[in-house]
Amino acid sequence: MGSTSQSVMMTEEDKSISSSNSLELESSRKLRPDQTELRWPWWVTGDCCGLVCAFVTNLLHFFAYYVQMKYVIGPWFGVVSYSGIIYTTLMLLAVISHNMCRFTNPGTVPLTLKAPEPLDRQLKHDYVCRRSGVIKPPTAHWCSEAQRVVVRMDHYCPWVNNVVGMFTQKYFLLFLLYTFLCCLFSGITLSGRAWTCSRRTRFNNYGGNFADPGLCNPKPADIILSVLNFVEAVLFVLFTGCMGADQFEAISKNTPYIDRLQGKRGKVRPFSENMRDVFGGEFSFTWFLPLPPSAEARTEFNRMLWDTHTHLQKASAEYQQEIDGAPTAHGVPIEGGEAGARRRRNGASPNGASATNGEITVDGPHSESTETTLAE
């Protein structure tokens, strides 16, 4: 009778603890991670190379704009012309996209979102950052330059002085696109000017409907700056073109760059669906504008974090039960005991997954075929 009463009291106590844990989780969810992370000014100041590269990137855009307006577009068509307006628009979109990518939080996991304890060693390895102790959703990685765990991290780019992650990949792609178009535009206008002036000189025809007759009579400063602008255009057309192709390959495979290096692969999905994840919503003109992260992206970010956190909480609770039932040596649970052997033999993971061909598959969020494969 006393044993039954004690069992009932323990059950009620367990329910009370479980209820308090649920209330704690729900109250913490009210502090939406997207609000706590995106509302603060973000600037990676610990990388000197990134600070210099980002400054030089803006400087090169303004240099090209000055050369084009002063020596090419201005004298040829006029500053206030279709060509001038088009190039100005492209340059502004490139610079704005660059600075939005630079000063926007890439999607960092809040430092307060720590992983529960205890956890199975393999789950801790895959879902917990060993440097900061915060949860690490699938596709999330630690960035040494930013000193944070970033969701859907592709890579750190010194040219934008930031991590290309969940909230910055769109800006990065727009920066590459508009920089590519600016350089292509500059290369075409400079080549066109050289060809037109050489043709007129060859036929001794110095006339023409130019805004400035001096277009084909360049001064030394004009020649030097135009050559530098042409070299810049060629180099960065190649650079941004290659970077853009690499980014679209990663999007098509639904696998960020770091995951590809680690031999991982994302869930196979249509390319259009992957593009919607990056640019937000259905295809529209907003895809081409450096607007703030969409509501869909914010919701997905929150869901990834809380799904992972809930996943780990359940695994932690089940693992604690196994530890309580395992034999101990000097108060330390023996992993090789009956409970541990049963887990390995039956393939049972702390979260109720199963083993197949020597591997444990865990029903993890946002991973390949909604599963994450963990080596045993």
Image (cartoon, grey):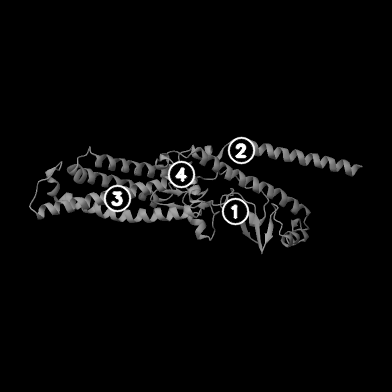
**Mark 3 or 2, closer to the camera:** 3
**Mark 3 or 1, closer to the camera:** 1
- Among the two numbered marks 3 and 4 on one chain, the one whose residue lies closer to the N terminus: 3
Asked if marks 1 and 4 touch (Cβ < 8 Å), the reply is no
**Mark 4 or 2, closer to the camera:** 4
State how far apart marks 1 and 4 are (Cα). Answer: 22 Å
Picture disc at residue 183: 3
State how far apart marks 3 and 2 are (Cα). Answer: 46 Å
Residue 329 shows in the view: no
- Among the two numbered marks 3 and 2 on one chain, the one whose residue lies closer to the N terminus: 2
Indicate left or right for 137 with 192 as reference: right
Local secondary structure at mark 3: helix
Quadrant (top left, top right, bottom left, bottom right) of the N terminus: top right
Q: Position of residue 21 (x, y in %)?
A: 69, 40
Badge 3: how crowded within 10 Å, few (<14), some, or many (20+)?
many
Type of amino acid at the residue the image marks with label 2? Arg
Residue denoted by label 1: 369
Asked if marks 2 and 1 touch (Cβ < 8 Å), the reply is no
